[in-house]
Image (tube, helix red, strand yellow):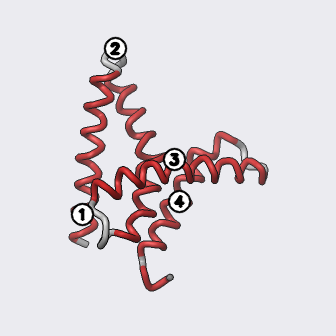
């Protein structure tokens, strides 16, 4: 449980750092808009990919898992959205379904006794 709290704290700190970077880049936007963009970025790409990368948490450091996981999450989100679209799922539900299923799959992958 302590490791989960430590990982959540690190993710929160990284989200705050991304928020500050986004505010510096998009300085003319309001803070509320930047917070929404940061939260959406983490929900769609960073958290699902990070959860999948938790399978390698003993071998790869936190920052590496977060960066690689974000890229992996972007790819997985695009792929799952495409296939759910082929199945007939409406686009407005993709923002909820695809990341949630990827986070659930990643949590099962991180438990090594299931593999």
Spatial separation of the CA atoms under disc 4 and disc 3? 11 Å
Question: Are the residues tagged 2 and 1 within 8 Å (C-beta)?
Answer: no
Say which residue appears at 50% left-offset and 82% top-offset. 115
4 vs 3, front mark: 3
Question: Are the residues tagged 3 and 1 within 8 Å (C-beta)?
Answer: no
Judging by the rendered image, the residue that carries numbered circle 1 is 5
Q: Secondary structure at mark 1?
A: helix
Spatial separation of the CA atoms under disc 3 and disc 1? 25 Å
Q: Secondary structure at mark 3?
A: helix
Spatial separation of the CA atoms under disc 1 and disc 4? 21 Å
Q: Position of residue 54 (x, y in %)?
A: 38, 66
Label 1 crowd bin: few (<14), some (14–19), many (20+), radius 10 Å: few
Judging by the rendered image, the residue that carries numbered circle 3 is 74
Label 3 crowd bin: few (<14), some (14–19), many (20+), radius 10 Å: some
Q: Name the residue nearer the viewer: 73 or 90.
A: 73
Spatial separation of the CA atoms under disc 4 and disc 2? 34 Å
Q: Is residue 68 left or right of residue 97?
A: left
Say which residue appears at 60% left-offset and 47% top-offset. 78
Q: Name the residue nearer the viewer: 16 or 72.
A: 72
Q: Residue furthest bottom?
A: 113
2 vs 1, front mark: 2
Mark 3 or mark 4, which is nearer the start of the sequence? 3
Judging by the rendered image, the residue that carries numbered circle 4 is 102
Q: Secondary structure at mark 4?
A: helix
Mark 2 or mark 3, which is nearer the start of the sequence? 2
Q: Position of residue 72 (x, y in %)?
A: 48, 53
Q: Is residue 102 left or right of residue 84?
A: left
Disc on res. 28: 2
Mark 1 or mark 3, which is nearer the start of the sequence? 1
Q: Position of residue 36 (x, y in %)?
A: 41, 33
């Amino acid at each position: 449980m302590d490791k989960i709290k430590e990982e959540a704290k690190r993710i929160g700190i990284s989200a705050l750092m991304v928020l500050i970077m986004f505010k510096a880049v998009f300085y003319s936007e309001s803070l509320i808009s930047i917070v929404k963009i940061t939260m959406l970025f983490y929900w769609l790409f960073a958290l699902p990919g990070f959860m999948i990368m938790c399978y390698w948490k003993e071998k790869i450091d936190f920052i590496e898992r977060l960066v690689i996981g974000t890229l992996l999450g972007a790819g997985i989100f695009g792929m799952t959205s495409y296939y759910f679209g082929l199945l007939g799922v409406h686009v407005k539900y993709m923002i909820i379904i695809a990341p949630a299923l990827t986070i659930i799959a990643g949590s099962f992958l991180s438990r090594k006794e299931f593999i």
